Amino acid sequence: MSLDWLHGPCAVPDAATAARAAARQGRLTKPPGSLGRLEALAVQLAAWQGHDQPTLECVQVCVFAGDHGVVAQGVSAFPQAVTAQMLRNFVSGGAAVSVLARQLGAHLEVVNLGTAVDPGPLPELIDARIAPMTTDFTIAPAMTTAQLNAALSAGRDAVARARNAGAQLFIGGEMGIGNTTAAAALACALLGEAPQQLAGPGTGLDASGVRRKAAVIAQALSLHEAHCGEPLEALRRLGGFEIAALTGAAIACAQAGLPLLVDGFIVSAAMLAACRIQPAVRDWLLFGHRSAEPGHDRVLQALDAAPLLALDMRLGEGSGALTALPLLRLACALHGEMATFSEAGVAGSQP
Ligand SMILES: Cc1cc2ncn([C@H]3O[C@H](COP(=O)(O)O)[C@@H](O)[C@H]3O)c2cc1C
Ligand SMILES: O=C(O)c1cccnc1
């Protein structure tokens, strides 16, 4: 399996449609600009969809799950078995992302990339198992090249399924105990940042736990940093199966012209890797929320991203992105259904 597809060209948002949508915003019965970012969102969605009046009826959420060898270093407040247990919870409908997807009529898919504990027979899961977990990256690279490749392809395959289902928006989520450590390590390598800047509590470490986590990341960086000049190599050495799948999904979305609504810290770290591999990926990303995980701000800044929501959420799974979805739908409805000044017989602004 070759990685050549990663470098295939990305789609280009439709500037002519954007211009027409912006002109329509100027004709709607409101002072120009008064709907703030909702106006820009509608214009952006129009450009992405190539439709003057965009809609978001069909939304695909894909949660990628995988376990992490670095958990052996004591970097999470929760045991590794939770990853597999949550897989069951996702498909039986009790996880936050399950509830949000159900409420919003989004289609939820869960991809198992490999867990330490077998989740048992769950026919609803998409089986893309690579290994029970990544290698502990304080000792050796997290993934072999073949494993990285398989994870990136699992992301691309999920985007292909979303397109076949007619998705107008893709939301990537993740589940993997220990993945805030992997995300922070990857972001440190890509940004040249110190571990203390990006290590945070994750699922709930106390201050000494966060110090330990930063020390674990520092140890990994001292082993791998010299080899992390290439973003793909940084991803292979310090990422995780679900993080690499998210990176692959983002590149595939940009190539297909399918916008991706970004979740929190972990997904954003994967987006950083994707944008380093292919800068044009950035044109297809919209950021749903600012996570309470302290490292998220720095990653958002590097991506020049202004997320829609800041609700102190720090869950992952795609929950922050889904919570922002109603705003996008409202932006579409306002854009499509508001009357223009001439339709409503309302006087426009004075010259
Ligand atoms: C019950 C439970 C449900 C979750 N859903 C997402 N996460 C989130 O927490 C994990 C990352 O945090 P850390 O790096 O500290 O382990 C990931 O699985 C992430 O998706 C969860 C965590 C738990 C415990
Ligand atoms: O922002 C996130 O994605 C996040 C933060 C903490 C734990 N899990 C996920």
Image (spheres, rainbow, N blue to C red):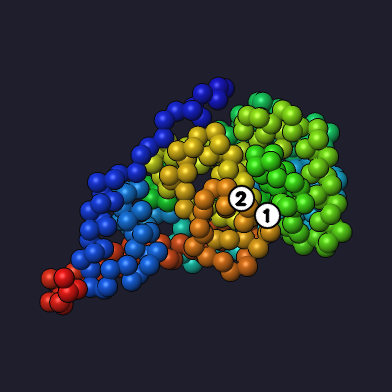
Query: Which residue is painted at 76% across and 47% down in the image?
Result: 195
* Number of marks drawn: 2
Image height of 256 relative to 92, above or below: above
Query: Which residue is painted at 47% across and 40% down in the image?
Result: 281
Does the closest atom of ligand 2 sit within 8 Å of the Cβ of label 2? no
Tag of residue 299 = 2
- Tell me whether the residue at label 1 lies in contact with that at label 2, contact meaning CB atoms closer than 8 angstroms: yes
Residue for badge 1:
295
Q: Nearer the viewer, residue 223 or 182?
A: 223
For residue 141, which quarter of the picture? Answer: top right
Image height of 23 relative to 103, above or below: above
For residue 224, which quarter of the picture? Answer: top right
Q: Residues within 10 Å of mark 1 (few under 14, many from 20)?
A: many
Compared across the picture, whether 295 is left or right of 205 comes to left
Tag of residue 203 = none
In the picture, which quadrant includes the N terminus? top right
